[in-house]
Image (cartoon, rainbow, N blue to C red):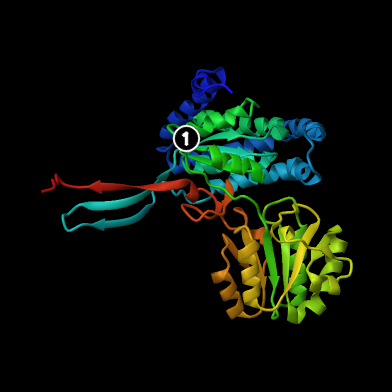
Amino acid sequence: MASHAALAASPLHDHCRGIATRARRAALDLAAVPTERKSACLRAAADRIRGDVAGILAANALDIAAAPGFGLTPAQVDRLMLDAARVESIAAGIDAVASQPDPVGEVIEESTQPSGLLVRKVRVPLGVVFFIYESRPNVTADAAAVALASGNAIILRGGKEAAHSSRRIAESIRGAMAASGLPADAVQLVDVADRQAVGEFLAMDDLIDIAIPRGGESLIRRVCSEARMPVLKHFDGNCHVYVDKAADLAMAEAIVVNAKCQRMGVCNAAESLLVHRDVAAEFLPRIAAALTAAAGVEIVGDADTRRLVPQAGVATEADWGREYLGPKISVAVVDSLDAAIDHVNRHGSRHTDAIVTADEQAARRFASRVDTACAVINASTRFNDGGELGLGAEIGISTDKLHARGPCGTRELTTYKYIVTGTGHTRS
C-alpha cells in the first residue's frame, strides 16, 4: 500500500484538493448572496432542466443500458430510471426549494446583557458539503438545490451507475449559476470514478465541513469509518407499521399497502408489520391478500402470523431488522401497544415508524416512546420525505440525534454564530 506521503503527492490527491479548494472559495462567496438572487438562480436552473428533457433522457438511456453490467437490482434500476414525468418532478423540486424561506441570517435568539452588549445568535451556512450517493440522478438536483439555497458549496460524488444523467443535470445547474453571477464552483460533480477519490475528500477536514453519504449501508459505514469531519447519515430504513386494536382496518389496509408497495426500493418503505392480537385474526388474512394482489409481496412471520396466513414463511431473528427494498415483509402479532413499541425499539433503524389507531392516547404514547426520527400517526411511512413534509427537497434523512434528525433541507444545512455588538465595551 502506498504511504500517506505518496498519496498526498499523487495526481488524484491534487485533483481532489483542487476541487475542495475551489468549493471553499465558492462557499465564502455564496454565503453572502441575498435570498432573491439564490431563488432566481434556482428557478433558472429548473427552467434549464425543463428545457433539456431530451438531453437528460438521452443521458439516462446510456446509464440504463449500462445497468446490467453493474449488476443493479430491479429496485436500483427503478431508482436510476428517468422519464419525462420524473424530470419534471426534478425541476419542480428545485422550484419548491426556491420557494422555501431562507434560513441564512435568521436571528435565532437576541438579548441585551447587563453590560449593554447586544448578543445575537444568527443562522449561517455550514460551508462545504461533501455528498456521496448512489444511482439516483434526481438526488443530484435535490442536493445541489438544497445546498445552494442554504448558502453552502457542495461536492457531488455520484455513483458511476448514474454518471451520464448526473453530469447532464449538474451542467444545467452550473449553467444557471454562471448566468446568474453566482460562483459555479459552489456545485461541482467529481469527474473521476476512482474509489480512492472518496478517501481523499474524507481526509480534507481543513476544507470540507460535513460529509453526507446517501446509499447502501456499506457505503455509509465506509464514510463513517474514514471521515475526519462530521457525518450526517442513516444506515438503513427498517420502517414499521403497527396496526393497533383500535385501528380502522380499511384505513390500516390502505396505509400498509401504500407504505410497502407504492415504491419498494426506498428507505421510507415499510419493511415490518406489527398487528395487535385483538384484530390479527380479522386483519392478517385481509392484508396478506391485499399485499399479494398489489405486488406479490412475500410474507415471513412469527408462529401466530403463520397460523393465520398459511402461505407465510418463517421469520428468522435477522428478518425483524432487515431492510428488504423489495417485495418482502416481516410480520408479527403483538399482545399490546407497549409490546409493539418494544419491538420497534429493539429492531428498528430509527428512521420512520407508523401507528394506525383511532385511540388518541395510544397514538400519543407510540409517538413519544418510539425511538425514531419520524413517528407517523394514521398515514403511510412514505411521507417521511422532504418534499412531503414541506422542506421542498432534502439532501438526505438523518437518524442521528445531534445537529439534525429526519429529512434534511435548507435549515439542516446551517449552523449558527454569535454576533456580539458593543459601543466601545472593554472587560474589566
Q: Nearer the viewer, residue 231 or 169?
A: 231
Q: Position of residue 393 (x, y in %)?
A: 59, 49
Q: Nearer the viewer, residue 218 or 84?
A: 218
125 with respect to 75 (left or right): left
Q: Nearer the viewer, residue 339 or 393?
A: 339
Check disc 1 and report its element: helix, strand or loop: loop
86 with respect to 391 (left or right): right
Name the residue: 57% across, 56% down: 390
Badge 1 crowding class, 10 Å Cα cut-off, few under 14, some 14 to 19, many 20 or more, is many
Say which residue label 1 marks.
Answer: 208
The quarter of the picture where residue 384 lies is bottom right
Note whether 423 is above or below 272 in the view shown.
above
Q: Position of residue 180 (x, y in %)?
A: 51, 32
Number of marks in picture: 1
Q: Position of residue 49 (x, y in %)?
A: 66, 36
The kind of residue on which mark 1 rests is Ile
Name the residue: 63% across, 38% down: 47
Note whether 352 is above or below 195 in the view shown.
below
The quarter of the picture where residue 77 lies is top right
The quarter of the picture where residue 134 lies is top right
Q: Position of residue 228 (x, y in %)?
A: 48, 37
104 with respect to 359 (left or right): left
Note whether 405 is above or below 18 in the view shown.
below
On the question of residue 394 being in view, the answer is no
Dividing the image into 4 quarters, which one contains the N terminus? top right
